[in-house]
Amino acid sequence: MPTLNSLNNRYQEKRLTIMLIIALLVLFVISLMVGDVNLSIINTLKNISNDNSSLESIILMDIRLPRTLLAVLIGASLGLSGAALQGMVRNPLAEPGIIGVSTSAALGAVIVFYFGLATAFPMALPLGGIVGALLAVIFLYALTRHNNSMLTLILAGVAVSSLSAALTALALNLSPNPYAALEIFFWLMGSLADRSFTHVWLILPTTLIGWWLMLSTRHDLDVLSLGDDTAQSLGVQIQRLNKRIILGVALSVGAAVSVSGGIGFVGLVVPHVLRPYVGYQPGRLLICSALGGAVLLLAADITVRLLATQQELKIGVLTALLGAPFFLHLILKSKREWAP
C-alpha cells in the first residue's frame, strides 16, 4: 500500500511534469517568432497551408523550426543524460560536460571534420561523436566503479576532458587549412544557428534510441539508490543497468554534440534543481530532467537571439557563463563530503 509520502511525491512529479510541458510549449512558440524578422505564426501557417511560398514561410520552415526542434532534442538529451549518470554513480556532480563526455564527443566529431569524412559520409559526424562519448563513459565507469566519491569523479572527468581538449587542439594545430581550423574552433563553442532539417533527421534515430535506453532504467535506478547489495537482492542486474545507461548517454550526447558543438552544464543544473520535487528519486527524475533540459536550452537559445550583440553569442558560451558559478557553488556546498 503506497504511503502518504510516496503519494505526495507522485503528485509533485505530475504537477512538475505538467508545468514543464506548458513552459516548453510556450517557449517553442516564442522561439518560432523571435529573430531578425518578426513573424505572425498564424498568418505564416495559413500561407504554408495554402502552398503560398512567402519569405515568412521559408524563414519559419527552413530556419526557425529546425533550430527550435534541435534545441528541444539536444536540451532533453543533456538533461536526461545528466540525471541518468548521477543516478548510476550516485553522485550529484556527474554531468556529460563536467566528466568529459561532451568533450570526448566533440573530439570524435572534430576527427571526422579533420579527415573530411563528413563530406563523403554524412552519418560519420554523429558516429564520430557517439564513439567519442562511448569511450569516455566506459573509461569513467571503470575508474569510479569501486569508488564513486565526488573527488574521484571530478579528477577522472578532468583527466578525460584535458586529454580530449589536448587532442582537439592538436587537430586544430595540424590542420592544413586555416579556414577549416577556424570553422572547427567556432563550432566547438556550441551553437544552433544555421542548422536545418538535415541535422534534425541526422541525430533523431540515435537520440531516440539513447532516450529509450536511459528511460528503461527508471525503476532500477530507484532501487539502486538503496545500495548495490539491496538492489541485487531485489533482482536488479547492475551490470546490465550500467551498460544501458552508458550506451544511452553515448548515443544521445554523441549525436547532440555532433550537430551543436559543446554545450555544457545543462545536465548538471537541471537535475539538481528538479531533484527535490521528485522526492530525490533518480528514476522519477529522468523524464522531468529531459523536459527541464529542453526548456533550459530553448530559453538559452531565445536569449542569445535577443541579446543586442554585433555577432550572435554562442549558446555554449552562455550556458558555461551560467553553469560554471553553479558548479562552483555545488563544490563548495559539498566539500565536507569528500574532504580527507
Image (tube, rainbow, N blue to C red):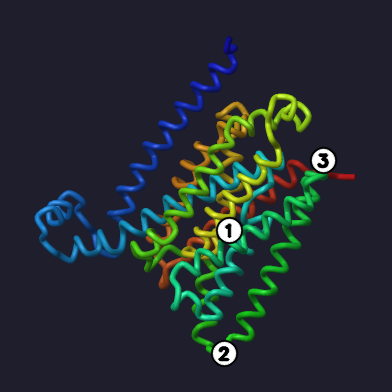
Q: Is residue 197 above or below residue 121?
A: above
Q: Which mark is residue 336?
A: 3
Which is more foreground, mark 2 or mark 1?
2
Secondary structure of the residue carrying numbered label 2: loop
The front one of 332 and 172 is: 172
The image shows residue 310 at horizontal and vertical percentages of: 41, 72
Residue, disc 1: 320
| Residue furthest out toward the top | 1
**Viewed as shown, does residue 253 lie left or right of 309?**
right
- Badge 1: residue crowd in 10 Å (few <14, some 14–19, many ≥20): some
- Badge 3: residue crowd in 10 Å (few <14, some 14–19, many ≥20): few
The image shows residue 276 at horizontal and vertical percentages of: 60, 30
**Viewed as shown, does residue 247 lie left or right of 166?**
left
Residue, disc 2: 176
Q: Is residue 109 above or below residue 39?
A: below
Q: Residue at x 67, y 54 (%)?
A: 137
The earlier-in-sequence mark between 1 and 3 is 1
The image shows residue 340 at horizontal and vertical percentages of: 90, 45
The image shows residue 250 at horizontal and vertical percentages of: 59, 55
The front one of 161 and 318 is: 161
Q: Residue at x 45, y 47 (%)?
A: 294
Dividing the image into 4 quarters, which one contains the N terminus?
top right
Cα–Cα span, label 3 and label 2? 49 Å
**Viewed as shown, does residue 234 lie left or right of 268?**
right
- What amino acid is at disc 2? Pro
The front one of 205 and 107 is: 205
- What amino acid is at disc 3? Arg
Q: Residue at x 42, y 72 (%)?
A: 311
- What amino acid is at disc 1? Ala
* Tag 1 and tag 3, C-beta contact below 8 Å: no
